[in-house]
Image: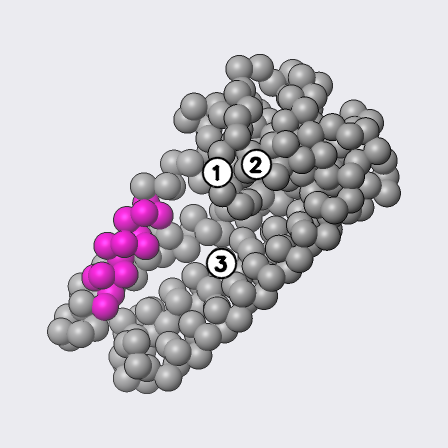
Amino acid sequence: MFFDPLYLVIMGVGLVLSLGAQFWVKASVSKWQRVRTAGGMTGREVALSILRSAGVGGVRVEPVDGFLSDHYDPSSRTLRLSPDIYHGDSIAAAGIAAHEVGHAIQHRDGFWPMVIRQKMVPVANLGTNLGMVLVVLGMAIGIGGLAKIGVALFAGFVAFTLVTLPVEFDASRRAHKALLSTGLLTAQEARGVAAVLTAAAATYVAAAVTAVLQLLYFMLRAGLFGRRDD
């Protein structure tokens, strides 16, 4: 499989998309990290302000190591921001902090794509690990049924990447709206936030496209579209 020209092309497309998205988001964040907001609020202060304005209580905001390691943990109701975002007072810091608060608001509101995504985490982990093993093993030893089981498991991972898209897009929409409605940013500053969050969204789109292409390849080689050697 790993020497199949078709698979190499698919993975090559995925690699180009992934690297392109990563370059875009790093360039966008780097640009807007150099631009301070007029209000001078740090990412932590922005997050706390939006949480208060939205009436979301019980959410901790704490720093976490790493570059762009920002995330919201619904299991502990903790919003973790990387050092540059937690302490930074840039437009990028405000936008990313607001985006993560968007996830906290989704959690509070029971936003159904987020609920589904959380329930799919075990399925996604199984699909990307055991699913891949079964697909490769089934193809290697010529047991089509085993490969098809692997394809079914991998499809769970693909579904997870797809349901992630509306979760991320909605969090960015909520972030943009909150930053303007609370007066934390001006309309001009919000355009910088939109640029950062659009670039970040591209990484999720790239991952989803790559996963779908892999699934189609596995389905083809497992005989779900015809003969395995088609």
Q: Comparing marks 1 and 3, which lies closer to the viewer? A: 1
* Label 2 neighbour load within 10 Å: few <14, some 14-19, many 20+: many
Tell me, yes or no, whether the highlighted magenta stretch contains residue 144. Answer: no
* Disc 1 residue type (three-letter): Asp
* Disc nearer the start of the sequence (1/3): 1
**In the rendered view, would you say 195 is above or below 228?**
above
Task: Name the foreground residue: 48 vs 178.
Answer: 48
Task: Name the foreground residue: 94 vs 66.
Answer: 66
Residue beneath label 3, please?
207
* Disc 3 residue type (three-letter): Ala
Residue 96 in the image, given as x and y percentages of width and height: 64, 39
Residue 121 in the image, given as x and y percentages of width and height: 37, 41
| CB-based contact (under 8 Å), mark 1 and mark 3 | no
Q: Comparing marks 2 and 3, which lies closer to the viewer? A: 2
Tell me, yes or no, whether the highlighted magenta stretch contains residue 130. Answer: yes
* Disc 2 residue type (three-letter): Pro
Residue beneath label 1, please?
65
Residue beneath label 2, please?
83
* Residue span colored magenta: 123-136
* Disc nearer the start of the sequence (2/3): 2
Look at 68% across and 24% down and name the residue there. 45
Residue 59 in the image, given as x and y percentages of width and height: 54, 20
* Disc nearer the start of the sequence (1/2): 1
User: Which quadrant would the C terminus be assigned to in this image?
Assistant: bottom left
Q: What distance separates the C-alpha of mark 1 from that of mark 3?
A: 23 Å
- Residue 175: tell me if it is visible: no
Numbered circle sitting on residue 120: none
Task: Name the foreground residue: 43 vs 154.
Answer: 43
- Majority secondary structure of magenta residues: helix
